[in-house]
Image (spheres, helix red, strand yellow):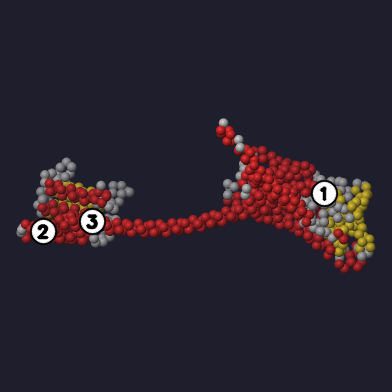
Amino acid sequence: MSDIAAKAPVKPARRRLLASRLVPYLLLQALIVIATILGLRLLQPSDPDDHAVTAFSLQEDGVTRPVTLPHFTASRYSLADPPLYTGTFTFRSGDAASGWSVYLPRFSNAAEVAVNGVAVLDSRRDANANRPDRNTPQIALIPASLLRDGSNEITVRLFVWGPLKGFLDTVYVGPDAALRPAYEARTLLFVTLQVVFSAWQSILAVILAIMWLMRRREPVYGVLAVAMVLGVIQAFMPPPVPPFTVSRLPAVLLASAPIESALIVAFGVLFFGWRWPRYGILLFAPGLIIFVVGLIAGPPLPRILFLVLGIPTVGLSLFLMAGVTAAAVIRRQDAASFTIGCAVTIVLTCWIHDMLSVFEIVTNERIFVSRLSYSAMLVAIGAGLTWRFARALNQVDSFAGQLVTRVREAEERLKASFAREEERARASALANERTRLMRDLHDGLGGQLVSIVALSERGHEGATITDAARAALKDLRLVIDSMDDIGGDLMLALGSWRERATAQLRPHDIALDWRVTTPQGLPLHPELRPWHVIQIVRILDEAVTNAVKHAKARHIAVTIETLEGERNDQGPYGVISVTDDGCGFALAGNGEAAGASQTARGLRNMRSRAARCGAVLDLSSEGSGTRVRLQLPRTFPDSDAAAG
């Protein structure tokens, strides 16, 4: 029960939140509607009323009656017997120097103007002048030879091919200098501006199409690009003028408006992150029907279908777009939804204004502005999308710049860290080297010096002390020689050892046979360190010493060779063998020497030193000699930890 009580206030709170967002938005749209209506009134061009001709007699369907312009004709189709408006204007011979013109602000669908029975203007020569969505004005100079001092006759023949009724606005006749500014102002507002917006649409359509091609996961760009292309087609493809009606262009032009409006709804749904509903495809049905009927049947059926299906589809799409943007404003509360919502409200207001003119509720004018506002809305939306895309690129560039800065800072920190680590490694290596030297001096030279002191204190003979001193000097030389930089070439250290071993064996009358079986000697080892060298040299010293002291050998052979690995991925490795012709010794089952403990301890030391270098020591003794085989590693270890 407590959960139900807790959930009960949720709906009222949500309604209050929606109302707090929707009410201000609706008030803003109401202000935009008022501002749009006032703008339509203020932007209405001012015509030269001093030269207006409004009183005409209309001959239509065999009946003549007086009418006052602006005027709507009764017939929707009057190509065979067009309505004829006949009026008069006054001309003074003193005004002939300035030149006179006849000016038609608005008409539909086409008009032919004659002065004193001679035609001076025929809008059918310009197909774009007969488009109801352009509000195209027309002006023509009246030849001076046609003008008579006093009253002159003017006739306007109105050609109507539906589906709307014909319309003729006030006719102006007077000096060209007085009529031309009004004509140019209307041309700028209702023709040039429309072309400019359409040109912007074509440019933005290309940009949006490129965006969509580069980002296929965002179809919103492609949908808006197609909508703009249809608008450009409608703006720049000239429609045929009756009686030349054998063309399929009207189907394309009439069908593009409802399809274009349906695409705008699809754009709004996708732009605000909603899924396009399955039944949404029905919104494209009216435009497709008009297009297919236009391709099969001739006029006026496509125009009638456009009036029945196309115009309501455009209005329905605008209302749907208004609802989509209102829902987006409630949910998102961002600038994009507010901006698009305001643009849709302006277009919807203009569309309602045009519908009032179509149904002759507004009887004093017929100026269609929804196409102009619609193009302006598309340009605004396309510019907004382009701006958003450019802002995203700027954000990416900014992020990339920040990333570069952070990477540079991280590199500096890493360099400093590496420098500290190198310093620590250098200090650690120096400490390890000092420890090794201390251990080597303690184990070798230190022990020999202690022996010398002990022998001197016990009063032993000088020869014994001399031998101990020589052994101490030998260890000191060994430690000093191990500090030399041999560049990873173990053969240099072995050459120094050979000289010392030869000198050691000479008093015992033992020959040293030095054999290098491979031209390159031993492989180079860049990772070779002094402590590796000293371990190897001491192993060889121990082997030679054992051969002299225990085996009573007369001949010692040292063999150096390089062997290849058993597999292709294994590199070469070196082997050093020390062989004597002494009496040998017995080996236990574990490979150690049997019997003499001193000999066994020496062999264990040799194996330990070999393991510390990553080498493998192999002993063999068959009673007639001993062989010590030291197999060097392919890569020497970095520390003594390799010894296990």
Q: Earlier in the sequence, mark 1 or mark 3?
A: 1
Q: Residues within 10 Å of mark 1 (few under 14, many from 20)?
A: few
Q: Mark 3 to mark 2: distance in Å? A: 24 Å
Residue at horizontal 84 percent and vertical 57 percent from the top? 104
Q: Earlier in the sequence, mark 3 or mark 2?
A: 3
Q: Mark 1 to mark 2: distance in Å? A: 132 Å
- Asked if one can make out residue 425 in the rendered structure from this viewpoint, the answer is yes
Residue at horizontal 79 percent and vertical 52 percent from the top? 367
Which amino acid lies under the numbered mark 1 shown in the image of this protein? Val
- Answer yes or no: do the residues labelled 1 and 3 have beta carbons within 8 Å? no
Q: Which residue is mark 3?
A: 436
Which amino acid lies under the numbered mark 2 shown in the image of this protein? Val
Which residue is nearer to you in this view: 558 or 196?
196
Residue 362, labelled with which disc? Answer: 1
Residue at horizontal 76 percent and vertical 59 percent from the top? 188
User: SS for tag 3?
Assistant: helix
